[in-house]
Image: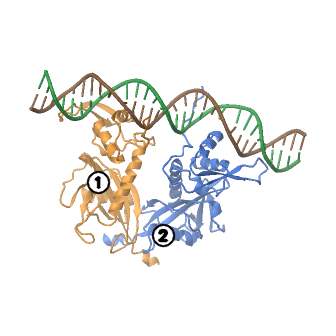
Chain colours: A blue, B orange, C brown, D green
DNA sequence: TGTGTTTTGGTCTCATTAAACATAATATTC
DNA sequence: GAATATTATGTTTAATGAGACCAAAACACA
């Protein structure tokens, strides 16, 4: 039995989510080798003896995507014996929410963003892993305004609302949202406005510093008032 | 580099919490071999090739403690290169909340319950793992009444309140607690009372079925009204 | 100049929750 | 039957949040 355990392999896989073109997108790499050749996968790689799991996730990410200096959080460890067809690979999944503007990716046939609402064929159990990361993101959103990790540094309240609607998959009332958004600790009103559009310019906002406190952001509710 | 990864070992470790003698206690085994001989550890063991992580955790638990059929939840995966002095062992930690009455353990010098408020010297990073499990338990408590997993099948409201106070480490107002406890979905009032004590008997309650819904149980608040 | 589109801002109602607080009833023991 | 310890119970106040609901201002473009 002890020898048996020696043949495990352990990897880290990283789900990177962002918002592009008004859609939640995940960074995927195309597999060049079997198994699952030509399927898409979230970036991953083996854990080295000298590094801990967080470090492995960051290194793998840097190697595969040249993405650096982002906040990663351990998501869940997937260890089904059949998740890898040839060998026994246990993977520790990580996930990150990033600003699209912070990541300079040369989109190529082997690396690119994909809408989570329309995923290509995925390798291994990576569909399950991505879905789990979306669930975790929703849970995060109930606790703190994760949009500061997803939106560009400067953003409009409409963009902020859109990010909430995308994550929660529901429409929100504009006036109610703005009222509460403006009450969010750390939100700073700038003296700048959007220009490019052909509509009324929107004021820009930013977050003063990263807020990971436990205060709930009450932007979402499940209740629907009944008309009488 | 690939060979390097072949030398990982992966284990599961299980934090089992319960309430005994008005204290949160964790099940520990004494290590009989090096490393950390004579220190205490949470039950653990290697993951077999044929089983997934959940199965491994359940099997390890059964082997080490003869405890069966309890709810386990994956906690976190700890993979610091130095967490094991001799080799590279990554552990997937699980945790469980159990009823003391469900577990028939012959307490021995090598196996027994220990108050989490007064832990003996622990092996590896098991102190950290236990602390993390307590944090998770508090988070669970904010979402659902975990006491149904910790208390005996039949319990008094005072016992229920005590379990909340132990987990949250704060005192609660008796009348406010009972009001909300009685409103908990699934709580059933029995026509039975405690007898043994020399005081007024207390009514017994039970939970109708396991409730893992997302409705928050508002038993706890951080706010303190100011006297005027 | 007018049309179209988007941003912007406030109030009301209703429901939920937190928190504070005091006394009577029940059983045991002596 | 007196003392004691525990259970049991309801109301009020204040705060917060959800949800519903419109009109005016700003800009671009034709």
Residue B149: give x, y in percent of width and height: 33, 45
- The answer to whether residue A58 is visible is yes
Q: To which residue does mark 2 refer? A: A56
Q: Local crowd at mark 2 within 10 Å, few (<14), some, or many (≥20)?
A: many
Residue A220 vertical position relative to residue A134 in the rendered view, above or below: above
Q: For mark 1, does the 10 Å Cα neighbourhood hold few (<14), some (14 to 19), or many (20 or more) residues?
A: few
Q: Tell whether A82 sits left or right of B160.
A: right
Q: Position of residue C22 (x, y in %)?
A: 33, 26
Residue B55: tell me if it is visible: no
Q: Is residue D29 left or right of residue A126?
A: right
For residue B130, side relative to residue A86 (left or right) = left
Quarter holding residue D4: top left
Q: Is residue D16 above or below residue A197?
A: above
Q: Position of residue B48 (x, y in %)?
A: 35, 65
**Residue placed under numbered mark 1 in the picture:** B117
Residue A46 versus residue A153 in the image, above or below = below
Q: Are marks 2 and 1 in contact (CB under 8 Å)?
A: no
Instruction: Give a yes or no on whether discs 2 and 1 share a subunit.
Output: no
């Amino acid at each position: 039995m002890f020898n048996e355990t020696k043949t495990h392999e352990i990897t880290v896989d990283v789900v990177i989510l962002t918002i592009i073109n008004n859609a939640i997108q995940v960074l995927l790499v195309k597999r060049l080798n079997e198994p699952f050749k030509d399927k898409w996968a979230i970036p991953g790689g083996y854990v080295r003896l000298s590094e801990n799991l967080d470090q492995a996730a960051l290194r793998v990410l840097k190697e595969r995507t040249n993405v650096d200096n982002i906040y990663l959080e351990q998501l869940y460890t997937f260890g089904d014996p059949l998740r890898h067809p040839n060998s026994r690979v246990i993977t520790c999944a990580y996930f990150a929410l990033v600003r699209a503007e912070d990541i300079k990716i040369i989109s190529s046939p082997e690396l690119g963003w994909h809408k989570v609402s329309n995923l290509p064929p995925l390798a291994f159990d990576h569909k399950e892993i991505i879905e789990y990361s979306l669930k975790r993101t929703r849970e995060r959103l109930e606790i703190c305004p994760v949009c500061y990790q997803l939106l560009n540094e400067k953003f409009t309240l409409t963009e902020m609302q859109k990010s909430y609607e995308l994550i929660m998959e529901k429409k929100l009332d504009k006036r109610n949202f703005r009222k509460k958004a403006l009450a969010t600790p750390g939100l700073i009103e700038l003296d700048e406005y959007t220009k490019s559009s052909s509509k009324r310019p929107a004021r820009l906002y930013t977050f003063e510093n990263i807020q990971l406190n436990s205060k709930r952001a009450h932007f979402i509710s499940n209740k629907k008032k009944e008309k009488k």
